[in-house]
Image (spheres, rainbow, N blue to C red):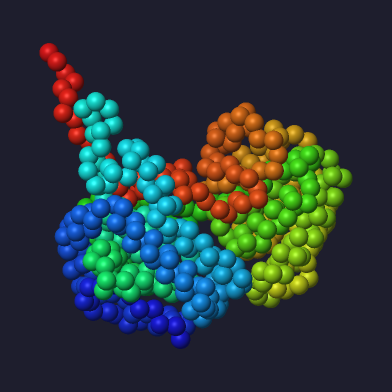
Amino acid sequence: MLELKPFCSHSHTVVEKTQNRYRILEISSGSMREIINMSPVIQERLSSIGIQERLGVIGEIGKIWREKLNDGRLEELKKTIARTTGYGEKLIEMEFSLIPMVLSKESLCENLACSPAGSILAFERFVEIKNGESFRIAPAGPVFIISSGNSLLPAIIPSTISLATGNLTIVKPSLSNYLGVVETYGALSEIASISEEAGTLRDALVISYFTHDSASLKYLLSEAELGVVNFWGGEPARTSVARIVSENPHRPKLVVNGPLTGCALIDEKSAEEKTAESLARNIILYDQQLCSSPTSGFFIGSWQNALSFASMVEKFLNEIGSDFDSDLDDASIFLTQSARKIFQLKGSHVLSSKNPRNFWTLVVSKEKMVLDEVVNSLPAFNIYARRRFLELVVVGSIEEALEHVRKIPGSPAFKDVDGVQTVGYSMSMDEKVLEKLVSLGVFRVVPLSDMFMRSPIEPYDGVPMLSAFTKIVYHRDLQLFKP
């Protein structure tokens, strides 16, 4: 049985619970009240540390993680997270290798420099924007982050930005990535004995799992004097959290990163092996559970060229998928096989794998998305059940492809998905197409080759991450009204 211990430097009592194969030691509501009551002092101490020093401490966490990864000390954790998430060990190893990049001082500096002040010095003092007018960026917390479980990075990124910008940060990871989040920030305790700044950051971070009936969770959402609640996930939890937070008398800001998805745009001029490999890789990685994963595709060109391209994708799905094992149960395999048959009956061309460790499906359909009809017949074949699956719809023009993109939100096949977050493209992308994607509500337009990667300066779902956890204090010493 896995034991989930809170990460918290403050003395606290815990409530012990069990849930399936987990023994959960959860911070009690009484201790959580004490921590929240201390938040003004904690945030003042944290903000008194220069921003470069704060980012330097976080950079050290990344270096320690890299050392542990290189010398094999994370092997057992890798195996455990592979079991809890259902992803293969090679994928977890790839994600582990990205953590030092996320925590690097240089990346964080780039992120924070994209503030409205245009300078990270605004996190320490007022910075003049124009004659007589200045901005000072202050923490908006305390911050409570409820993270998703589809990946470790979506828990690490907001937690790090919140901590770096001076907030008391309380993080509730999911069961699947909890141990990875605690291991990442455990380095703060390792260096706190030789770094006063690291000790201050450690004191400002609390990591605990809370069960659904937790008194501590109810207190944080409905009563605690929070500045921000950042929720990652979908229904029904999203609506439940929003309702409870709305009753909190302190009116914390609710920032929701809801369920989104991705799609691929490919034209026949770009239908070469490199493009096929890119599409296959993004289908395989994370079993399409990221908001940036391509869960639909549109091929602009002839039917014959689309079939030739699909054959190239088939090759790479077999090659790449064999390196990244997946683990589907019998019910999921049966559901996918049933869907494959319906596609064939409706005239689509179906390529597929029989390997249960790499159970992929690639469907090529003419002009319309047949997936909607399949989901109407098989409601259980929803976006969360479709793993390593893509329908490639063949269309004659970019206008037809964009019309399909427009219809994705609200379609039967994408029920409970708010919209398209990412368009991965392998085609000529001109300003007219870009502007159309803007009007369709798309948040990211990136090369197909690395849809899953994020630049340090990227906003999240249209909003810079740091803006969620900060507030701008405006100062003017220039009189505007002169009677």
Residue visible at 37% across and 69% down in the picture: 185
Name the side, left or right, on which 474 lies relative to 290: left
Residue 108 drawn above or below residue 7: above
- Name the quadrant containing residue 63: bottom left
* Residue 481 higher or lower than 462, as above or below: above
Tell me which residue sits at (85%, 50%) in the image: 308
At which x and y percent is residue 349? 83, 54
- Identify whether 120 is placed above or below 358: above
Residue at the farthest front position: 194
Q: Position of residue 468 (x, y in %)?
A: 35, 48
Residue visible at 58% across and 54% down? 452
**Rendering coords of residue 162 (x, y %):** 33, 55
The extreme top residue here reads 483
- Where residue 95 appears, as percent x and y from the top left, is 54, 65
Among the 4 quarters of the image, the one containing residue 380: bottom right
Depth check: 286 or 449 in front? Answer: 449
Question: From the image, which quarter does the C terminus lie in?
Answer: top left
State whether residue 241 appears in this view. Answer: no
Q: Nearer the viewer, residue 452 or 21?
A: 452
Relative horizontal placement of residue 52, taking residue 342 as reference (left or right): left
Q: Is residue 42 left or right of residue 74?
A: left
Given residues 159 and 229, the one toward you in this image is: 159
